[in-house]
Image (cartoon, rainbow, N blue to C red):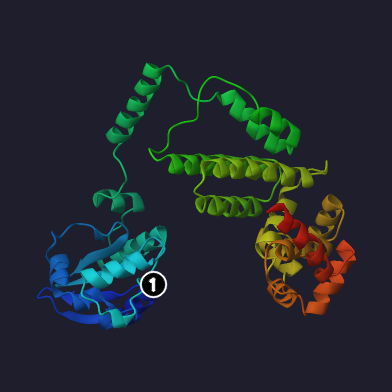
Amino acid sequence: MKREFLLDQWGRMLHCDICLVSRDCNIRESYGGMSAERSPLHTDRAFLKMLLEREEKEYPDIYCENHSILYAVIPIGQEKLIIGPVSITRPSAEQDAFMVKTHRISGAAMHIIPYCEPKTFCSGILALYHVFTGRELSSEELWEKNGLQGMTREEARSNVQKVIFSRQENRMPHNPYDQERRELDSIRRGDREMLRRSLEETYRGEVGRLSRSEIRQAKNIAVCVITLASRAAIEGGLLPEEAFSMADGFIQKIEEMENIVKIDAAMRQAEYEFADEVNRIHGEREKNELVERAKNYIFQNLHGEIRIGEIGCRIGVSTAYLSDLFHRVEGVTIQQYIRREKVRLAENLLRYSEYPVKDIANYLSFSSQSHLGRVFKEITGMTPARYREKYRTSHKNENV
């Protein structure tokens, strides 16, 4: 095993530096590409010494600073591997300022802390630990042994009992489950009127308290409601990837809001959007798991050139069988369906974005702007420019 190659590739996968450090606090090798002037392991010797002198454990030692910046220390013989720094939240100016100030990094170094998703960082550390020690750990064990598991079972149960006691003392139950079930069932059915009636029901009780901050409370409730609504829409036939993307978009917009009334209105609008989407696709047609998987694959790859053979290969059936099955169930060929879905996405981009038609054509892998124009007019009856002129104006007026 060539250690240098392995560690260099691991650093690239984890988006951070991996340093091989001797017990006398000298960095022997550094992998991953971060310049010495930007690395706290190089600029802050006291910090490096602190990491080295932490108690040696029978598992990777995770050190966390500023809430979300992680380092991992793995002993290998007379040396130690130090992996990091890496942020497990999206980098921010505040994080970079913290690193510059705390670890004596020159402002001229233009420090930007590397980012890695928590699951990826955890998997990388566990695999690296196994390579050098032969030992295996689960991700849950790694976080728990490092005191990063969130809460103990006793803490969780204690807090639950406090909430139950408070509810009983105040004689104020939660909102009734049967009302919530009707609300979600209306989305599952794609029934806007049923949804309206369920939202107008009066009942004794209130939604749970999820935060002491009123703004955060409203946002947390909205996140819960939209998440449940997206799952109900999937059960109603909406493609999972489309439902997840809709939920992400709604929640991101709500996170930008600071008005409780607007947050609540946006949450309800999201529910109606899910119901409308289910209603749109709710024609009483035959449902088929292979066809639904093919449609989900198409939705995930609308920005690229989709080959029917690749779809069949991905879901495990022949191209001929899939083509025949799809046409029988959906009433259109796969190619017609792909064109229709690309045009539907183009409609949304024309309405709700400022992208030029040429860029939209390129994004959706049409051979040219004129190719998009021909297909678009064939399906909608108007050119992309005319469509934007008509519906973009209408959208703007709705927001006045």
- Residue at the extreme front of the image, as rendered: 400
Q: Is residue 316 visible?
A: no
Q: Quadrant of the C terminus?
A: bottom right
Name the kind of residue labelled 1 in the image: His
Name the quadrant containing residue 1.
bottom left
Mark 1, residue position: 15
- Measuring from the top left, give residue 280's x and y in whole percent: 78, 47
> Which image quarter: residue 242?
bottom right
The front one of 124 and 278 is: 278
Q: Find residue 122 and report its horizontal and vertical position in percent.
A: 35, 59
Q: Up-down: is 18 above or below 200?
A: below
For residue 195, above or below residue 115: above
Write the residue at 58% across / 20% down: 203
Decide which of 61, 317 is in the foreground and name it. 61
Residue 63: give x, y in percent of width and height: 23, 60
Q: Residue furthest left?
A: 24
